[in-house]
């Protein structure tokens, strides 16, 4: 409650006491005494409220990890930053509110606060945020990351072959993978899934057929996934 509101409430109380008193000298002295004590009470509340407002809390005191992932389609290449807290929450859909700004030479990210979801997905998980950086030019970008009252300045190096994130040694924000190899131009990439171990030879024959047609298959893109029933 604000100071002006408190003052109006107590003034009304004083006026009511004066109207309903018998106007005797003893009553008036009692009212004046009460008014002094109540005024002192208002003053103490005002002092307490001022000191409370001067106390600032850190709205974001969790450390953040960032994982780089690249995605491509027919029109664009996207560097996705999957950001998540070290802390695990009771709901897996806590999210990190943030802002992002990309200019010719600078990428600025501001992590604002952790938000509680309206509907809790009842599984454990970190608070997270997804940041998409689309069609970055090949150059060295200044990378500025703000998290609460801390500003961390580093670099994001973009080249034909890779993305490289460089930050000073600290604990607030860290990249899980500081270097990410890019998907080459004219590459066909994806995943092959199989439902049972018996189908592994079929998958292997498909990969072998690509090699027979002069496709170059890299080890890091050759991943077989078994889907359980």
Image (tube, rainbow, N blue to C red):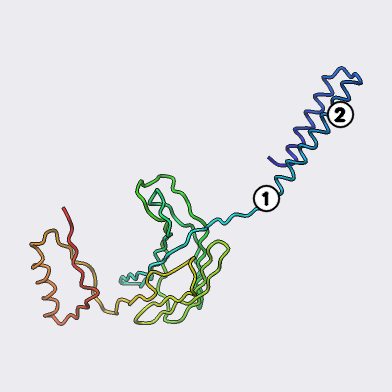
The residue positioned farthest toward the right in the image shown: 25
Residue 73, quarter of picture: bottom left
Residue at figure coordinates x 68%, y 53% from the top left: 54
Question: Residue 32: which numbered mark, if any?
Answer: 2
**Secondary element type, mark 2:** helix
Q: Which mark is residue 23?
A: none
* Location of residue 50 with respect to 203 vertically, above or below: above
Residue 170 in the image: state x and y as whole percent.
49, 70
Q: Work out whether residue 210 or residue 37 is closer to the camera in this orientation and state it.
A: 37
Q: Residue at x 45, y 76 (%)?
A: 166
Q: From the image, which quarter does the N terminus lie in? A: top right
Give left or right: position of 210 versus 105.
Answer: left
x and y, in percent, of residue 183 in the image? 30, 76
Front-lying residue, 62 or 197: 62
Compared across the picture, whether 179 is left or right of 201 comes to: right
Give the residue number, with chain letter if any, for mark 1: 53
Residue at the image position 11 percent from the left and 59 percent from the top: 196
Distance of label 1 from label 2 (alpha carbons): 32 Å
Q: Position of residue 94 (x, y in %)?
A: 43, 52
**For mark 2, does the 10 Å Cα neighbourhood hold few (<14), some (14 to 19), or many (20 or more) residues?**
few
Query: Where 161 falls versus 77 (above or below)?
Result: below
Find numbered disc 1 in the image and state the secondary structure of the residue it sits on.
helix
Q: Mark 1: few, some, or many residues within 10 Å (few <14, many ≥20)?
A: few
Q: How many marks?
A: 2
* Mark 1 and mark 2 residues within 8 Å of each other at the beta carbon: no
In the visual, does 204 lie left or right of 101?
left
Side of 162 where 166 appears, left or right: right
């Amino acid at each position: 409650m604000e100071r002006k509101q408190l003052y109006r409430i107590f003034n009304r109380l004083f006026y009511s006491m004066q109207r309903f008193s018998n106007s005797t000298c003893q009553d008036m002295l009692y009212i004046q005494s009460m008014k002094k004590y109540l005024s002192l009470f208002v003053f103490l509340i005002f002092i307490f409220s001022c000191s409370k407002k001067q106390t600032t809390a850190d709205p974001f005191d969790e450390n953040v990890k960032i994982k780089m992932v690249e995605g491509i389609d027919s029109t664009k290449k996207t560097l996705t930053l999957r950001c998540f807290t070290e802390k695990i929450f009771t709901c897996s859909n806590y999210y990190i509110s943030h802002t992002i700004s990309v200019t010719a030479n600078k990428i600025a990210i501001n992590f604002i606060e952790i938000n509680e979801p309206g509907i809790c997905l009842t599984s454990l998980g970190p608070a997270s945020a997804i940041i998409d950086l689309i069609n970055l030019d090949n150059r060295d970008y200044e990378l500025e990351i703000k998290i609460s009252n801390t500003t961390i300045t580093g670099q994001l190096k973009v080249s034909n072959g890779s993305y490289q994130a460089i930050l000073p040694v600290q604990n607030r924000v860290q990249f899980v993978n500081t270097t990410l190899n890019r998907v080459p131009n004219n590459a066909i990439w994806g995943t092959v899934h199989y439902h049972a171990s018996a189908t592994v030879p079929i998958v292997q024959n498909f990969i072998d057929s690509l090699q027979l047609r002069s496709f170059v298959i890299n080890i890091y893109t050759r991943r077989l996934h078994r889907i359980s029933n």
